[in-house]
Amino acid sequence: MNIGLVLSGGMAKGALQLGALYALSEVIPLEEVKYISCASVGALNGYAYMTNKLEKAKQMWSGLCNKGKMGLYQFLKSDVLQQSIINLYDPEDSISSEFYCSLLESNIKNIVYKDLSKVDKDKIPLYLKATVALPVCNRAVQVDGSGYFDGATVDNVPVFPLLDREIDYIICIYFDDICYKFESTEFDNKIIKITFPNETSLKQSFVFQQDSIDKMLEDGYEKTKNILKEYFSDGYDNLEQIYRNIDLINQNNKESRLRLTGDVIITNFNKLTQKLTRRKIL
């Protein structure tokens, strides 16, 4: 099969996403996932998933806040997240599928989707570091003479690299409280949307706290497990039934309303910055 996976950024809420990937790994064999596209901390989780390091990533998330509560700016300035994502890398890692990370060139003119399966292995940790390098908080990460920042500032749900791929369906995990309609009806009808809207989502996005992260790991796993049961009512490989389930669930979600969360603010800001940037797949 040709399955795609899209992982958005979400700062501390990436712990929910990691829990979701645990659930996903129990249902779909890794070799069936041929395309992955990630933004920001989603690249950390996506890399762990693709290289069979979910347990190492879980330990990393659990250890991020061993000093207790930490605000976002303090956390990012500490460089802890950048170092953690680098520590996931091993020269022996094998990336057998297309693996895109959204990056913003430091001139703020181009959004780049870098396929890490095609770059020199010694450059992979640099690109991973760049995926969580936020302007203002961090310096641009230099790779081959070009500087890169976190691409989530322009595209936080990076479906773009998968638009022209022959894909059976895409699992898209993001945090906005809305059932997005992606790009075109034909494309949208192949997307399984797993979202984690929450009335405390703004706090969850911007505060790194041990007990909160542990709970998000558990909640992400349980919710995704239940959602996948709805979509895969007759197995993950019965495409006809999956498409029917996608259509039914989309219809039931058509009246979802936009809620003001940190992730939605980023998404709305993206609409402005996208007009000033060009997209490149590398």
Image (cartoon, helix red, strand yellow):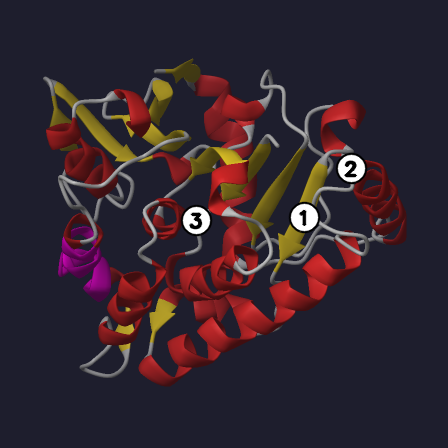
Residue 205 within the segment the image draws in magenta: no
Magenta: main secondary structure equals helix
Q: Tags 2 and 3 in contact by the CB under 8 Å rule?
A: no
Residue drawn at (27%, 63%) of the image? 56
- Image height of 45 relative to 106, above or below: below
Mark 2 or mark 3: name the one nearer the start of the chain. Answer: 3
Residue 45 in the image: state x and y as whole percent. 37, 52
Instruction: Give the magenta part as a residue range.
Output: 74-84
For the C terminus, which image quadrant?
top left
Residue 140 visible here: no
Q: What is the count of numbered marks?
A: 3
Q: Nearer the viewer, residue 188 or 19?
A: 19
Q: Nearer the viewer, residue 124 or 261?
A: 124
Q: Name the residue tied to disc 2.
A: 239
In-image side of 176 versus 71 (left or right): right
Mark 1 neighbour class, 10 Å CA radius: few under 14, some 14 to 19, many 20 or more: many
Identify the amino acid type marked 2: Leu
The quadrant in which residue 14 appears is bottom left
Mark 1 or mark 3: name the one nearer the start of the chain. Answer: 3
Mark 2 neighbour class, 10 Å CA radius: few under 14, some 14 to 19, many 20 or more: some
Mark 2 or mark 1: name the one nearer the start of the chain. Answer: 1
For the N terminus, which image quadrant?
top right
Q: Name the residue tied to disc 3.
A: 9
- Image height of 80 relative to 182, above or below: below
